[in-house]
Image: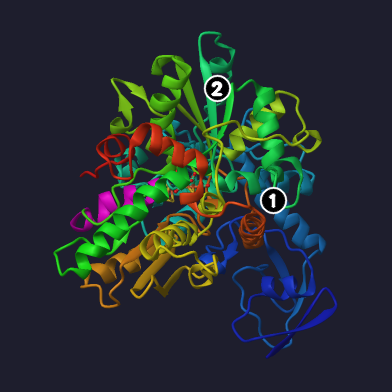
Amino acid sequence: DIKITIDGKEVELPIGSTILQGAQKLGIHIPTLCHLDLHDIKMVNQSASCRVCVVEVEGRRNLAPACATPVTNGMVIRTNSIKVLNARKTVVELLISDHPKECLTCSKSGHCELQDLSEKMGIRNINITGNSMSTYKKEYTTSIIREMDKCIMCRRCETMCNNVQTVGVLSGINRGFDAVVAPAFDEKLEDTVCTHCGQCVAVCPVGALSEEDSTWRVVEALADPEKVVVVQTAPATRVALGEAFGLEPGTVVTGEMVAALRRLGFNYVFDTDFAADLTIMEEGTELLGRLDKYLAGEEVALPILTSCCPAWVNFIESQYHELIDIPSSARSPQQMFGAVAKTYFAEKLEIPREKLVVVSIMPCLAKKFEASREEFSVEGNPDVDIVLSTRELAHLIKRANLNLKELEKEEYDNPLGISTGAGLIFGVTGGVLEAALRTSYEIKTGKTLEKIEFEQVRGFDGLRVASVDLGGITLNVGLAHGLGNARDLLDEIKDGNPRNLHAIEVMACPGGCIGGAGQPYHHGDVNVLKKRTASIYSEEKNLTLRKSHENPAVKELYETYLGKPMSEKAHHLLHTHYSK
Ligand code: HC0
Ligand code: SF4
């Protein structure tokens, strides 16, 4: 070990540690900007480009960046000397001198790490002259807005896109004041293989990357007396929305969220969890069908891949064309909900689909893209009209002067608001597969599960495999969260599936949907994701209905409308095909 002194306090550290890690161990806060260390999800950005974390090292003439300077025995460090403070202030002033001063209207205002630093450093005016500000045109994709004149070259997005997601569409281009992180040749993001996962947005410290804002479209729809507006809330939103109102990460606010949505004026407040149960009926039946064929020695596409994560679907479509036949053909719960709302529910209300507006509240930015796919509309009328992120919903609630914390809990509406615990756990990595196993086991064996939790598929490791007994058949399953881990699994399948996997669940975002890019910002704290995960599981444990096939509203939908899973009507409304 190495012994160093920081601000008069001694600490021992393993070889290879940085000054920053030493300070963290001592509880001494050194400000950072470009640095981000989420090693649980393999997101470590150590570009040392911003120099906000500089410290004084005794015996050295130059200040050292704490995030990238390895410790050596006997080092004496000062983190708060006048020299350090002045240097940090100059660094931040330089960054601001090439940054639009748009804090009043910036989507990141209040969450911007540069704004925070400026405030902390007491910067009141910028006297640096002679710089010409870089100007870049705003780019709008279906889900992401890029404002590259706000890019500070921290390269967090690049690390996320390249190292964690392995999509690799972002890299540093240009030099000097014009330097930004962008697709190669400054191509439009929309024209690249970007999956719309939005994880670059989730780690951008400033307003350079943000989400498309649909809140005003929702306000307009709600104000239109001609429209009936229904809303669905994704599983993972209920354990994160509270953070935007100052509650602890993972606080469950389901009832308060329902109440807020009613106050906002939605005519029906429904739950994506209902559609998640429906997804299990379709996907589970498909899985058992493929398994039966496989056991009978027939040629069949295995492993089956879950298909509910839209960034994952984009990834496989653009990068693994040769595997395009293996994902389940089941649409995602969001899209199943939309299709059922605009047929079954519209018919119940006796209104044409055009009169119904379906709004989704999603933890995800790729859901905006998914809803815009042509195959999910009928004669130009989309099944899901507008998708809001959890953050956008928080804005809407605040705009209406409601305080989520003060609202009395309310219940979802019938029938598309009825769900089981199996639907709820969709929000975490492993949840979709666990939900599918619960139902497949009982349908296959005709027996009741003794232990409903499939602990084997739970956990936070990026790539997991497990074997599960499905009534005499051993089912080998694989799970990945984060697209880099998914790539490892897909490469394995391409190489002949040596582990003989039968079913694979992939979620594009670290942690699954709870870590979606539309959730309140985690500000580099992986524990936020872990707390949300724990809340989903503990909430689920207390539910009376925990298996999708026991959902009474889903049963009724089959009895009165769809017939049975994989029926012709179910195929038409609930399944899809993949392209490219
Ligand atoms: Fe998810 Fe979903 S679980 S993708 O993570 O399957 O976004 O929360 O809504 O559609 O249900 C996101 C979350 C959903 C869908 C569901 C699935
Ligand atoms: Fe890369 Fe995802 Fe951002 Fe697209 S949305 S640029 S895939 S991190």
Membership of 311 in magenta stretch? yes
Q: Could you say which quadrant of the image residue 466 lies in?
A: bottom left
Rendered residue at 30%/52% (across/down): 328
State the image coordinates of residue 116 (x, y, percent, origin top left).
Answer: 72, 46
Q: Residues within 10 Å of mark 2 (few under 14, many from 20)?
A: many
Q: Which residue is mark 2?
A: 218
**Residue type for callout 2:** Val
Q: Secondary structure at mark 1?
A: helix
Rendered residue at 48%/21% (across/down): 357
Main SS, magenta residues: helix
Given residues 529 and 251, the one toward you in this image is 251
**Residue type for callout 1:** Thr
Magenta stretch bounds:
310-324
Rendered residue at 28%/33% (across/down): 375
Given residues 300 and 94, the one toward you in this image is 300
Membership of 80 in magenta stretch? no
Q: Which residue is mark 1?
A: 90
